[in-house]
Structure formats: C-alpha cells, structure tokens
Image (tube, helix red, strand yellow):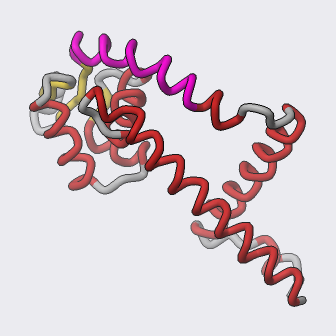
C-alpha cells in the first residue's frame, strides 16, 4: 500500500513539474517575439478554426470567458486578431487571425517544433508512444470522473 501511494504521489508530482517546467521554458523561447505561450496557444488554435465564436473558443480551450477575453484583447491590441460580429447574430463575436498573426505563426512554429524535439531528444520512440498512451488513458479517466462517470463505482469494485 505504501509503495503504491508513493508512486501515485510521484507520478502526479512529475506530471505537474514537467508541465510547469515546459511552460516556463517555452515562455523563455518566445520572449524575444513579445508573445507568451498562452497567446501562442490561442493563435495556434484559431489558425485551425479561423472565425470561431469567442464563446465556443473559450469552451474548446477550456478557459473562462473572462480569461479568454483578456487574451483576445491583448492579441487584438497587438494586431494579431480581429473580432467581427456574426452575420446572423450581431451579439455573437467571431475571432479571426490577421496577416500579422499568420506571419508570426510562421516564425513560432519552427521554434515550437525545435523546442519539442529538444525535450524529447534521446528518448526512445517506444517510450514516447507508451507515455502518450498512458497519459491519454489517464486524461480519459479524469474526464469521465469529472463528468461523474466512475466505472469502478458501477462495477462493484471498492
């Protein structure tokens, strides 16, 4: 029991610490461009879903509407996005990339690719695939738990 508990704590710590270190390091990589990782994340998502409703964008990114609104405000002030009223409902705002944002994405993508390659350097492909499958399974389990669907409770296991 004690070994299992130690492993659980260590795994959670490692996931959290790797995520934190990755965020801090990537922000440093982008600092010379005057953009944060959070802003890059939003721009990258919009680039795959240009013209998405701002409310839907908040839902897709799993961030609050206020937090996303602040990010969009900064991106808009920098000339990277523009909000436009929806053609059918003027109250609905859609978010679009500008040409400046597309140019910036073209600069950041190779930085991001190189950064990720350096992180994963010398880790065997099989290990990466196993880690990805494991983390995906954990993510699915956590999503189910957050929706109140706990399989272990329904199958009689204690």
Compared to 17, does 29 lie above or below?
above
- Can you say whether 15 is above or below 57 in the image? below
Q: Is residue 59 left or right of residue 12?
A: left
Nearest to the observer: residue 103 or residue 69:
103
* Residue at 23%, 43% in the rendered image: 71
Which of the 4 quarters of the picture holds residue 100?
top left
Bounds of the magenta span? 98-115
Side of 134 where 93 appears, left or right: left
Image location of residue 156, percent across then percent down: 88, 83
Which percent across, then down, holds residue 80?
Answer: 20, 23
Q: Position of residue 36 (x, y in %)?
A: 32, 39
Quarter holding the N terminus is: bottom right
Residue positioned 58% across, 61% down in the render:
17
Q: Quadrant of the C terminus?
A: bottom right
Q: Going by the image, does 15 lie left or right of 48?
A: right
Frontmost residue, 81 versus 151: 81
Q: Residue at the location (56% across, 23% down)? A: 113
């Amino acid at each position: 029991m004690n070994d299992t508990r130690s492993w659980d704590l260590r795994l959670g710590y490692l996931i959290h610490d790797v995520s934190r270190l990755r965020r801090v390091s990537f922000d440093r990589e982008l600092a010379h461009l005057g953009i944060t990782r959070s802003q890059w994340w939003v721009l990258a998502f919009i680039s795959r879903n240009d013209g998405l409703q701002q409310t839907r964008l908040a839902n897709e990114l799993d961030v609050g509407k206020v937090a996303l609104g602040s990010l969009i405000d900064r991106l808009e002030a920098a000339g990277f996005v523009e909000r436009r009223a929806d053609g059918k409902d003027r109250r609905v705002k859609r978010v679009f990339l500008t040409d400046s944002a597309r140019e910036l994405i073209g600069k950041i993508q190779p930085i991001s690719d190189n950064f990720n390659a350096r992180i994963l350097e010398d880790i065997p492909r099989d290990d990466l695939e196993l880690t990805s499958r494991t983390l995906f399974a954990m993510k699915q389990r956590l999503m189910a738990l957050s929706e109140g669907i706990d399989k272990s409770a329904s199958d009689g296991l204690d």
